[in-house]
Image: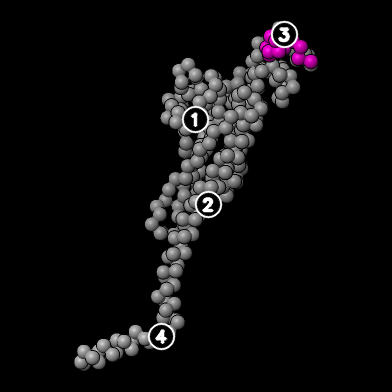
Amino acid sequence: MTTSKLGSRLRRFRRDSDGYVTIEVMFMLPVLFILFGAAWVYFDVFRQQSVNQKANYAIGDMLSRETEEIDDTYIDNAFKLYGVLTKNTTNADELTGLYSADLRISVVEYNAKSDKYSVVWSAARGDLGELKTNDARDYADHLPVMANSGQVIMVETAEDYNPAFNVGLDPMRIKTYSFTHPRYAPQVLFASQQNGNNGWGNGDQEAPGGSLCNNNAENATDCGNEDGSNNVEPNGGYGGP
């Protein structure tokens, strides 16, 4: 075959637009499936991260509004709530589901004199252990500088995520973190550490939780003191004679 004939046939092949749709689909479908699977996996991991963060915020906000002490039952139910919010299956005994989940709730206090944080109490469910004061120092860059003896509620969650398709994304651990100031009480106490205190400690008889009878304010224990006169100092302060 001469060079001129070969060139003529190649030009004719280039101009030819005939073809079979079936063959073209066979070439394109695998590529489309791979692109669709990759897009779905990356979208899903960002969606799961967003869901976990919102569930974390919800638990932190819930805790910040508490005026009674927190106990183990409360922590268990918060753990189950986290499972519901993140679409995990829950039962009466433990959290189970497609992803394994962990939850840790800690109250951290700031000492202005030493410029350090300490753990008032910590409770964990899942594989996370309770936070220790030495560990709290690692969070210094993530916590706000507060007034002396100020406290924040820190909520940490973790969840194993396994991609549905192998698109180059390895299994990962989705972690979320948030801190919230107590809203209606100066402290949120754990039942085993509250020593008869209901978490208010301010002698305010109008505060929820019966704080007039159960508080740590000095000389503020008169349950019949309905007008609060025994709890208010002449200068308007609480806890005076």
Which amino acid, by three-letter code, is at mark 2? Answer: Arg
**Of residues 228 and 89, the one drawn nearer to the viewer in this rendering:** 228
User: Is the residue marked by circle 1 packed among few (<14), some (14-19), or many (20+) residues within 10 Å?
Assistant: some
**Is residue 131 rendered to the left or right of residue 13?**
right
SS for callout 3: loop
Q: Residue at x 66, y 18 (%)?
A: 202
Q: Is residue 155 above or below residue 133?
A: below
Which amino acid, by three-letter code, is at mark 1? Answer: Leu
| Residue that label 3 marks | 234
Callout 1 touching callout 3 (CB < 8 Å): no
**Of residues 118 and 90, the one drawn nearer to the viewer in this rendering:** 118
Q: Which disc, if any, is residue 143?
A: 1
| Residue that label 4 marks | 17
Quarter of image, res 23: bottom left
Please say whether residue 212 is one of the residues in the magenta stretch.
no
Q: Residue at x 74, y 22 (%)?
A: 206
| Residue that label 2 marks | 47
Q: Earlier in the sequence, mark 3 or mark 2?
A: 2
Q: CA distance from mark 4 to mark 1?
A: 66 Å
Q: Is residue 84 above or below residue 231?
A: below
Q: Which residues are magenta?
A: 227-240
Mark closer to the observer (4, 2): 4
**Is residue 94 rendered to the left or right of residue 12?**
right
Q: Earlier in the sequence, mark 2 or mark 1?
A: 2
Q: Position of residue 211 (x, y in %)?
A: 70, 20
Q: CA distance from mark 1 to mark 3?
A: 37 Å
Mark closer to the observer (4, 1): 4
Q: Which disc, if any, is residue 155?
A: none
Which amino acid, by three-letter code, is at mark 4? Answer: Ser
Q: Position of residue 168 (x, y in %)?
A: 38, 57
User: Is the residue marked by circle 3 packed among few (<14), some (14-19), or many (20+) residues within 10 Å?
Assistant: few
Callout 4 touching callout 1 (CB < 8 Å): no
